[in-house]
Image (cartoon, helix red, strand yellow):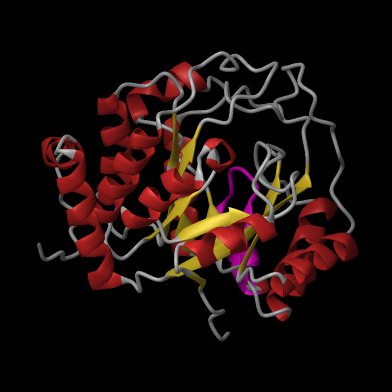
Amino acid sequence: MTSAIRNNWTLEEIQAIYDQPLMELVYQAATVHRQWHSAKEIQVCTLLSIKTGGCPEDCSYCGQAARYHTDIKVQALLPTETVLAHAQKAKETGSTRFCMAAAWREVRDNKDFDRVIDMVKGVNDLGLEVCCTLGMLTEEQAVRLQEAGLHAYNHNLDTSEDYYKEIISTRKFDNRINTINNVRKAGITVCSGGIIGLGETHRDRMSMLLTLATMPKHPESVPINALARVKGTPLEDNPKVDAWDMVRMIATARIVMPASTVRLTAGRIEMTESEQAWCFMAGANSIFTGERQTLLVTPNPGVSEDMKMLQNLGLEPKAAISH
């Protein structure tokens, strides 16, 4: 199976890939993966919540929405030195990408944004790929981030356009697309994927992949998240995502977006090492690691556990790219 970059996929084609017998699907994805990437390298990323909780949005899955009563403690924007110390530690433990997340609906042109710009410059100076996820963004703000050295901007679609309104009412799917377009225009790479386990259908999952795979340029990075069920949110009682569904999603994303980095992100804490190994076989080539609070305040495996897992599987952390 040879893979070329295509931006004209149909929903039926993607569904047909996803519905194949699992072994065939994983074999095809692993084949495509080897054509475009080193099969032994995994990019290790660290995500830090630089401003936590108190968000005015109503995303049903998120413990940081101000309207839900969760155990997450609201925390103002961290001091720049604290963030840079976290970034330095992440670099020392093998991360090559550092992502800073702020629980904002949108970026406002104020002192907080000025401080984020300083953080981006500082992390960039450490030689790490800098990524931010700060909510909605104007084109001018994207340009400021790019000039500060931002490498990537994360803005997930979350789910399909049709199902989106069932999960979030405080903004529209089109707002997501507009921000992604603003990021592209500014010359920043795009990190955009979604979450499974929100109560969506398999067709919604394919529709989300279709939106990503038919963009004029595929996102350079596609995170596939399993819902991390947070007590106090409307989705706290949703069933745990089946690991084979994660494998299918990752394999399908790998086949339709062959050059993208596919990230195995939230939900890893509930997966065994064997289940994660299947995800790597199916084309995932990046993980988030770090301290407990870093992955948007939901638990995450620790660095030493992850390094041991990579060693067990004969995988190695991807080296940093030179700036």
* Residue range (magenta): 129-147
Residue 187 makes an appearance in the image: no
Residue 97 makes an appearance in the image: yes
Location of the C terminus by quadrant is bottom right
Vertical position of residue 39 compared to residue 306: above or below: below
Q: Closer to the camera, 65 or 235? A: 235
State left or right for residue 78 relative to residue 146.
Answer: right
Residue 205 picture location, percent across and down: 32, 32
User: Farthest bottom residue?
Assistant: 322
Q: Residue at x 26, y 69 (%)?
A: 34
State left or right for residue 147 relative to residue 15.
Answer: right
Location of the N terminus by quadrant is bottom left
Q: Is residue 181 magenta?
A: no
| Count of numbered tags | 0
Residue 26 picture location, percent across and down: 23, 50
Q: Closer to the camera, 10 or 145? A: 10
Residue 282 picture location, percent across and down: 31, 53
User: Farthest front residue?
Assistant: 312
Q: Residue at x 15, y 47 (%)?
A: 24
Residue 226 picture location, percent across and down: 48, 35
Q: Closer to the camera, 217 or 199? A: 199
Q: Residue at x 63, y 28 (%)?
A: 62
| Residue 35 placement: quadrant | bottom left
Vertical position of residue 197 compared to residue 107: above or below: above
| Residue 70 placement: quadrant | top right
State left or right for residue 248 relative to residue 71.
Answer: left
